[in-house]
Amino acid sequence: MTATVPPTSPSDGPMADPQGRVELPPGAVPDDSRFANADLLPVPVARRNWTTYNFAALWVGMAHNIPSWLLASSLVTLGMDWKQAVFTIALANLIVLFPMLLTGHAGPKYGIPFPVLARASFGLRGANLPAMIRAAVACAWFGIQTWIGGQGIFILLGKIFGGWAEASKIGGQPWTLWLCFVLFWALELAIIHRGMDTLRRFENWAAPFVIVGALVLLAWITVKAGGFGPLLDQPSTLGWGADFWPVFFPSLMGMIAFWSTLSLNIPDFTRFGAGQRAQIRGQSLGLPTTMTLFALLSVFVTSGSQAVYGAAVWDPVELAAKTDNVFGLLFALVTVLIATVSVNIAANVVSPAYDLANLAPKIVNFRTGALITGVVGVVIMPWKLTATPELYIFTWLGLVGGLLGTVAGILIADYWIVRRTVLDLGDLYRPGGRYWYTNGWNLRAVLAFAVGGVMAVGGSHSAPGKGPFPEDGLIPFLKPLADYGWAVGLAASLVLYAVLMRPNGRAGAAGRVP
């Protein structure tokens, strides 16, 4: 490893306020630094003003969306009853909250986004490895969410105007569906183009509106059904015995993977936090409670559809389209729009915008990165990943969860075990400093990622005809670990990275490398 440069003088060093929030003095990072731009530099303390409500509203807005609604239905499709599905979702979100709070700690303290935090562990150049993995996942999610939102608009407008589904087809789909998709895509990018303050204001009012919309849907179907219907009494086809656990554990990892992306880039949001209390309380109030209640709500509404229509209608858009009331359709349309825009911008545009800016700070800024995300999210056509529950949960979410869990393990080990939450803020932007390692790469982090990633996803397997992997697994002897990919990746990389960095001793806490 290369030697480090001497620390900066005290007058040039970072300054901390009484709450422990650190910021750089003016001029601490050269204007011509190739590792910095206005979007990647620390947020000034004066602008770190997000409160508990802002973070809670952020999570309510992100959790209340169509894919979240469909999570319970995916699990029921696999044989669980509603109690098992809700239990799985609740447990998964309690588990993923823990790394979310750990990685989120660096946001209010240093005001830095995820790719800059990753420089401490991977190196100034090496941070592009986890950043690009996270960006690729976000682009795929952006495409999935935008397609689902466009479909929702298409279905509801088709009910209002009629004849949309019979329009001439382009690429196997009605041109009216493509129109809804493009318009929805443009709306999302227009909002994010206005910046993070606009996003905060949007989430503040979007969150309660979506809750009201879901409750209106529940009230409507309850009145029509005269009760919640028979779905709550339907037994599990798996029971609680030997048939349940082989489905439960990969499903649990899949549910964790649903928000494991945010467990990495949550500093992109917490960097605007007024303090640790705001982000801890806001996330704890917003994530597990919201996802659990939303899963319950989806089950209750679907149970009512069972009583009214004789078959469970799990898709809220399809269910809302069954009403002939124009006002009800318009209200459902606005709710779908707000719910999908809320989650897609916050969860799937903000992160890759910063990640792409980190790749080339002098060429790509936050807004340019957001536009690139929008284009890539369409080009890769990721909606195919949701074709079946097996492909969606076991392949897509399982694979993504394993890789992202591996990155999370390294970030947590570096920030909490090696550094003890102490970072040299200026050196996160300076080549040749504490985090330069070997020509900008920390090879120990790369090794920990490679080993953890192989252990997490190397055993990936598919049932015959159900997915892209061999039945015996990519690496057969790792097949038993495949159902626990996120946990295996996080634990393996965390332990290995901590061990590899251990020879640094106490100096590791200050970020020095021999």
Image (cartoon, rainbow, N blue to C red):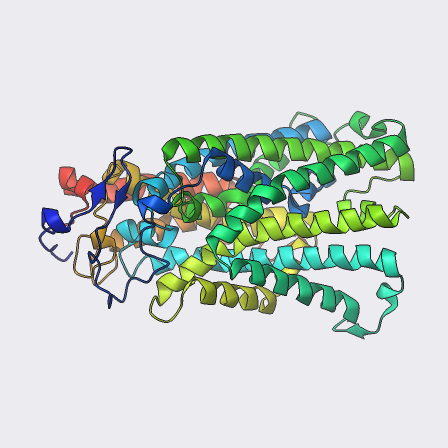
Which percent across, then down, holds residue 466? 67, 53
Residue at image coords 42%, 51%: 454
Which percent across, then down, holds residue 289? 58, 30
Between 487 and 119, the one lying in front of the other is 119
Q: Give the answer, above or below, for where 198 lies relative to 500.
A: below
Q: Give the answer, above or below, for where 45 lies relative to 432.
A: above
- Tell me where residue 300 sits by quadrant: top right
Q: How many marks?
A: 0
In the picture, measured across the screen, residue 34 lies left or right of residue 141, that is left
Between 260 and 227, the one lying in front of the other is 227
Between 219 and 205, the one lying in front of the other is 205
Residue at image coords 25%, 33%: 18
Between 315 and 18, the one lying in front of the other is 18
In the picture, measured across the screen, residue 441 lies left or right of residue 182, that is left
Residue 477 seen in render:
no
In the picture, measured across the screen, residue 490 lies left or right of residue 380, that is left
Q: Give the answer, above or below, for where 397 lies relative to 370.
A: above
Which percent across, then down, holds residue 312? 83, 39
